[in-house]
């Protein structure tokens, strides 16, 4: 694990003598986080604020601070300290059995003679093989493939909340109150449809689930990178997943919606139209997890100390912008590096960067809930930011990768029902179903109700309840009474009032008949789909059309394709429907659909074109070289871009040292290649730079891989730059409609920067600007063969 302050982190070394390591015993009597005590007498429990239920102090706390289950103040290191109790390092240790017996030999089973049968008494073989046979747990039905990281959330000191003078007037939730408080978090990003072994770059929704380890218990904000969902009621969820998963007769396709059963389902569900527009857009092809937004999807409630409530939508906004891949690129990445997004997150954090998101909320007062033309409880709808702006509350930083993927990322378990005082639910029918489903699916994965005791899931707030048994119980609960009411245990653990931090549900008045029906306010299916289409730039609209051509082009049944065009797309935008029809063999509709909205509304916040910040921090840049490259140019390119926070790698035909000219180091200008063409490609980088040097450029001109590298980057709208004789490689490729520099010139054209002058500083400034733009959509790359 790499973190920004590993040198400050202390781990308890395993005890080599076999005796108890007293340094692992905490002041509260815990050993290895087990939660037991070294006393046989019962004591009064401490609440999450370091005070006993009767109000007296405990564990040396005055009762005014916030403390974790070790009695320490909760900060961004609290979860790390808790996990240190269960971390194990083999460094310098003997191999042992699961029960601590040292093992003398582990390569051969115990036999009756060298060539004889294995003997059943070989406990080491039985234990090793049994453990191996049972290593896997059921993968998640959805969100099976993912990755995660540790970090913290910190509220802003004085957030601009418009009608609220202080955040406490908005909610009493503790993570938002103290600007000095850093609440530990663990975030898991995921794809939705594919299995655990599928590729990262498929067209799909991305899960964005955050576990806040607060002083009041765990809060799980379980969302996605798209602010809406496919369906309106959780009753439909099994049908949706069955339709989009591989078809049951042959088990294909994997991690793809491009097949008949999904589009059959979609074509018969008008409510899905808005989500389909997002799925066909670049939002479903994120460049990186650190470059995608996150959303709570549902409308929630925030509740203040007075018990007053307002509606809220949660938004995560990434520091590095919201950026996409392109479809041709994603398919090639899946072959070259199917772990592209996973590896990127680890690489960025371990390089010392800290991915960051701002958490904001859209606030709607209860009395204003009916003022919209849609229902706030409808999960297929957004609240347009043109109507309700996002108010920032704080920031989340990810700064630490897991030590063990299985123990942390695979075993982390989220549940939307994990909330804390100040956060409550609404009657969104999809959310209500998730409140059951997530708890249920964890029981299937872990075969135990004790999944919340696994270290990554365990809260920092102390746990005191009457759950005492079940598979793999880890806590050792002292005392006789495990029921309520009781007199034997003096009624402990006792219920907490709201003043003592007890959770109280918002007292919403409900009056209605039991009925299987849906509100008429949920029946507007095309207004926001059209809003989304209108909000896209022309390149984004073309990406949506191209995506529809691919997805529906994989559908065999003509009637399904026709329904999508006539019944859904033609009720969003007539031109859109015609453009899709022309690519999938469907007769284009002659006039707009009867339900097509007539509005031309747009929301600029929906376009990724408006979400690209002017920074190149964490961008990955390839520098193409070979023997004879200008070493001074390479050195200046690398240092300048790295000073801006970019990650630079030298790419050559083969690995090893390359002779550089003009270099002034002791090696005579030798430059080490980081990657070779056989292991990488332009698809794994954000930009490419070709420095000068006669020998290097001559070699590149003879290399098909080098020319493919640049041509492919151009086809994918990526920044390209060449300096000095490096411009000859670009000229040889005859990139369409691109002007390159002549002697003494610096030229920037459609994201291609070329320089044949001495103005290296101006060249690099132009390169930085080009990279910051992410993609250059004004190109016409269709003529480029790559």
Image: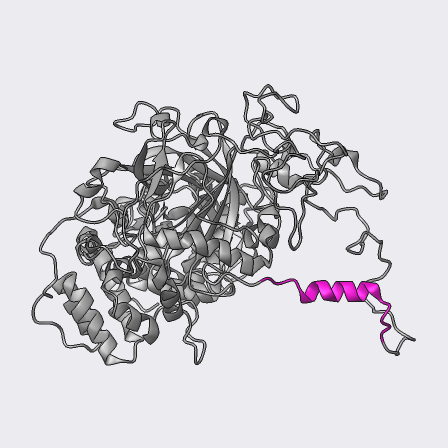
Q: Within the image, what quadrant is residue 162 found in?
A: top left
Camera-nearest residue between 90 and 296? 296
Please indicate whether residue 744 sits to the left or right of residue 52 in the image: left
Residue 104, percent from left and from top:
87, 58
User: Which range is magenta?
Assistant: 118-137
Residue 665, percent from left and from top:
56, 41
Please indicate whether residue 697 sits to the left or right of residue 323 in the image: right
Can residue 251 be seen at all in this image of the molecule?
yes
Residue 138, percent from left and from top:
56, 63
Say which quadrant the N terminus sits in. top right
Residue 210, percent from left and from top:
46, 45
Residue 67 among those drawn in magenta = no
Please indicate whether residue 61 sits to the left or right of residue 582 in the image: right
Q: Residue at x 37, y 51 (%)?
A: 431
Can residue 259 be seen at all in this image of the molecule?
no
Note whether 297 is above or below 239 in the view shown: above
Camera-nearest residue between 344 and 507? 507
Camera-nearest residue between 308 and 120? 308
Say which quadrant the C terminus sits in. bottom left
């Amino acid at each position: 694990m790499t973190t920004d302050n590993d040198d400050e982190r202390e781990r308890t070394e395993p005890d080599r003598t076999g005796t108890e390591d007293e340094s692992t015993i905490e002041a509260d009597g815990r050993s290895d986080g087990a939660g037991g005590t070294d006393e046989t007498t019962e004591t009064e429990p401490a609440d999450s604020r370091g005070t006993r239920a009767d109000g007296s102090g405990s564990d040396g706390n005055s009762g005014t601070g916030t403390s974790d289950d070790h009695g320490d103040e909760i900060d961004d290191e609290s979860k790390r300290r808790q996990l240190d109790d269960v971390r194990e390092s083999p460094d310098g240790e003997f191999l042992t059995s699961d029960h601590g017996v040292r093992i003398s030999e582990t390569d051969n089973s115990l036999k009756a003679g060298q060539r004889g049968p294995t003997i059943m008494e070989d406990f080491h073989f039985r234990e090793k093989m049994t453990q191996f046979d049972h290593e896997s747990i059921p993968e998640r039905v959805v969100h099976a493939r993912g990755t995660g990281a540790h970090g913290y959330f910190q509220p802003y000191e004085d957030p601009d909340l418009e009608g609220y003078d202080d955040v406490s007037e908005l909610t009493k939730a503790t993570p938002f109150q103290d600007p000095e408080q850093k609440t530990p978090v663990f975030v898991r990003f995921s794809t939705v449809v594919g299995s655990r072994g599928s590729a990262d770059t498929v067209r799909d929704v991305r899960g964005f689930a955050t576990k806040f380890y607060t002083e009041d218990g765990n809060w799980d904000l379980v969302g996605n990178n798209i602010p809406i969902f496919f369906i309106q009621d959780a009753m439909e969820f099994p049908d949706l997943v069955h339709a989009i998963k591989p078809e049951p007769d042959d088990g294909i396709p994997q991690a793809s919606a491009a097949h008949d059963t999904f589009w059959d389902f979609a074509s018969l569900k008008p409510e899905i139209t808005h989500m389909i527009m997002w799925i066909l857009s670049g939002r479903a092809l994120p460049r990186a997890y650190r470059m995608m937004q996150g959303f709570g999807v549902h409308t929630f409630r925030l509740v203040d100390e007075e018990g007053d409530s307002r509606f809220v939508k949660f938004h995560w906004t990434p520091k590095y912008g919201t950026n996409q891949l392109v479809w041709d690129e994603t398919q090639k990445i899946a072959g070259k590096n199917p772990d592209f997004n996973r590896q990127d997150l680890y690489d960025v954090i371990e390089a010392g960067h800290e991915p960051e998101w701002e958490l904001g909320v859209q606030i709607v007062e209860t009395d204003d809930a009916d003022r919209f033309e849609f229902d706030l409880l409808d999960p297929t709808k957004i609240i347009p930011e043109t109507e309700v702006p996002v108010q920032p509350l704080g920031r989340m930083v990810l700064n630490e990768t897991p030590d063990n993927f299985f123990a942390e990322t695979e075993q982390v378990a989220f549940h939307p029902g994990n909330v804390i005082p100040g956060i409550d639910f609404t009657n969104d029918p999809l959310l209500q179903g998730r409140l059951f489903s997530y708890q249920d699916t964890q029981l299937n994965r872990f075969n135990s109700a004790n999944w919340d005791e696994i270290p990554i899931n365990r809260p920092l707030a102390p746990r005191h309840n009457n759950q005492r048994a079940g598979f793999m119980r880890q806590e050792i609960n002292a005392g006789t009474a495990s029921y309520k009411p009781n007199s034997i245990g003096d009624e402990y653990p006792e219920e907490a009032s709201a003043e003592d931090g007890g959770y109280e549900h918002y007292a919403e008045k409900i009056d209605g008949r039991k009925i299987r029906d849906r509100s008429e306010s949920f029946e507007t299916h095309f207004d926001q789909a059209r809003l989304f289409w209108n909000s896209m730039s022309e390149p984004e609209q073309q990406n949506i059309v191209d995506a529809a051509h691919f997805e529906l082009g994989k559908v065999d049944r003509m009637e399904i394709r026709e329904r999508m065009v006539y019944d859904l797309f033609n009720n969003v935008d007539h031109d859109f429907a015609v453009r899709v029809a022309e690519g999938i063999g469907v007769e284009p509709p002659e006039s707009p659909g009867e339900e097509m909205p007539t509005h031309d509304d747009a929301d600029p916040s929906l376009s990724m074109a408006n979400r690209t910040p002017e920074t190149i921090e964490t961008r990955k840049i390839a520098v193409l070289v070979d023997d004879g490259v200008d070493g001074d140019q390479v050195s200046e390119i690398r240092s300048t871009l790295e000073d801006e926070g970019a990650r630079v790698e030298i790419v050559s035909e083969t690995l090893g040292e390359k002779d550089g000219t003009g270099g002034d180091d002791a090696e005579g200008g030798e430059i080490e290649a980081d990657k070779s063409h056989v292991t990488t490609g332009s698809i794994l980088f954000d930009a490419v730079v070709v420095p000068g040097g006669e020998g290097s450029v001559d070699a590149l001109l003879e290399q098909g891989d080098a020319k493919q590298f640049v041509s492919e980057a151009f086809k994918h709208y990526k920044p390209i730059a060449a300096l000095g004789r490096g411009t000859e490689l670009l000229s040889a490729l005859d990139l369409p409609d691109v002007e390159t520099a002549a002697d003494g010139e610096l030229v920037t054209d459609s994201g291609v920067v070329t320089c044949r002058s001495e103005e290296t500083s101006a060249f690099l400034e132009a390169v930085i600007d080009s990279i910051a733009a992410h993609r250059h959509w004004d190109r016409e790359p269709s003529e480029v063969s790559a």
